[in-house]
């Protein structure tokens, strides 16, 4: 691996429940549930997906808590087998399906706990993505906070300085930062979650008609609780995971199957073609530098929509209250649990 993310994190004892056996629904049941999920998506105005490590296992990147996960094997004194490096890993069928669903207007937002950069490599537009734990292909300036795409994965984690000047100088516009130094974008246990990404994730999750989780046991908070934010507004939760999760009883629908198979079936029912990965749309393959900063104007626009949603929800509940809750804040760890 160009960077062993798990080993790069600081020591942390409580990694959650590890190695729980996987369950598989029958093919017939999976088909029925995928049909229902496709209909839910088609009939919804605001759909949000929440992606965990299980989304990337078919790309050769192991998860953390699965039967052969990094921390599950670590507990046994073993090490996982990596089938690829972060640099060589390509977006899975699921990553490409999500990009296509966004582009066709079926999905409004994606919240990711993954640091592997595969959403970035798929060509997904930044304005549709919250990266709560960072991205191994992103550098960030410690002064101006702008983010830029790397061609290779960073070899450090924990927001360590890279000894490089702010990349904005290479773009050469009036917004060039003077004196800033780049650091890696990958969070360690004690770091605050990125404010803009977390705000966007919270608002979209709250407004969602359905929150759909993919490949996560939802053991970390606040990330693992975001899919529940729509329930008090009449929204639905859908869980797609092979292992049981802490929120299964709250789910309107739960599907136990491989994520690639689920999204392939859903896209087929929606008449959506899943494109192949192409380096043409992968910013890590471009010769010119690409910026990855989430603009503040996106957050402000979503905040307007969020406030209107809260007012409408309060009115529908006949409470007479139109107050909006403050945006969510949090660290990478809370209640001492870490993401998949």
Image (tube, rainbow, N blue to C red):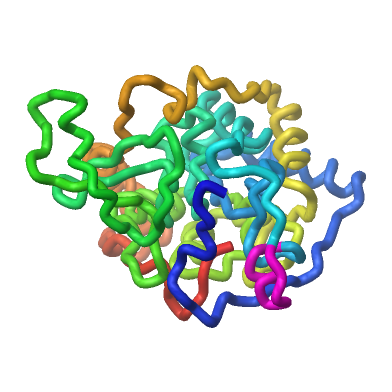
In-front residue for pair 321/139: 139
- Up-down: is 157 above or below 298? below
In-front residue for pair 228/11: 11
**Residue at the image position 11 percent from the left and 31 percent from the top:** 175
Residue 88 % position (x, y): 59, 36
**Residue at the image position 53 percent from the left and 56 percent from the top:** 4
Residue 215 % position (x, y): 65, 54
Which quadrant holds residue 298?
top left
Q: Is residue 182 left or right of residue 312?
A: left
The quadrant the C terminus occupies is bottom right
Residue 15 % position (x, y): 57, 75
Could you tell me if residue 131 is visible in this image? no
- Up-down: is 184 above or below 174? below
Is residue 14 one of those drawn in magenta? no
**Residue at the image position 55 percent from the left and 24 percent from the top:** 104
Could you tell me if residue 336 is visible in this image? yes
Numbered range of the magenta stretch: 69-79
Residue 124 % position (x, y): 48, 31
Count of marks, rendered view? 0
Which quadrant holds residue 316?
bottom left
**Residue at the image position 34 percent from the left and 51 percent from the top:** 184
Q: Is residue 327 left or right of residue 103?
A: left
Which quadrant holds residue 254?
bottom right
């Amino acid at each position: 691996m160009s960077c062993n993310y798990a080993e790069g994190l600081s020591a942390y004892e409580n990694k959650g429940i590890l190695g729980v056996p996987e369950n598989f629904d029958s093919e017939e049941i999976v088909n029925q549930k995928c049909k229902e999920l496709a209909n839910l998506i088609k009939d919804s105005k605001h759909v949000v997906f929440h992606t965990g490590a299980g989304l990337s296992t078919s790309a050769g990147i192991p998860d953390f808590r699965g039967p052969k996960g990094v921390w599950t094997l670590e507990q046994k004194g073993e090490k996982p087998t990596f089938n690829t490096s972060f640099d060589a890993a390509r977006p899975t069928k699921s990553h490409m399906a999500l990009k296509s669903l966004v582009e066709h207007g079926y999905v409004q937002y994606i919240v990711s706990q993954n640091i592997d950069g595969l959403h970035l490599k798929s060509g997904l537009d930044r304005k549709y993505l919250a990266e709560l734990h960072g991205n191994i292909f992103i550098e960030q300036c410690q002064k101006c906070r702008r983010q830029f795409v790397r061609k290779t994965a960073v070899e450090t984690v924990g927001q360590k300085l890279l000894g490089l000047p702010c990349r904005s100088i290479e773009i050469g516009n009036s917004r060039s930062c003077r004196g800033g130094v780049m650091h890696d974008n990958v969070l360690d246990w004690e770091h605050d979650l990125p404010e803009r990404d977390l705000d966007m994730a919270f608002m979209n999750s709250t407004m969602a008609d359905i929150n759909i989780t993919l490949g996560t046991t939802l053991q970390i908070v606040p990330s693992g609780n975001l899919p529940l934010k729509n329930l008090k507004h009449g929204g639905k939760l859908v869980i797609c995971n092979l292992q049981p999760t802490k929120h299964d009883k709250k789910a309107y629908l739960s599907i136990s199957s491989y994520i690639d198979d689920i999204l392939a079936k859903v896209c087929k029912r929606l008449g959506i073609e899943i494109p192949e990965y192409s380096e043409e749309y992968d910013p890590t393959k471009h010769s010119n530098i690409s910026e990855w900063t989430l603009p503040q104007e996106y957050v402000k626009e979503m905040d307007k929509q969020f406030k209107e949603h809260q007012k409408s929800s309060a009115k529908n509940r006949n409470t007479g209250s139109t107050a909006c809750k403050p945006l969510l804040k949090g660290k990478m760890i809370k209640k001492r649990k870490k993401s998949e």
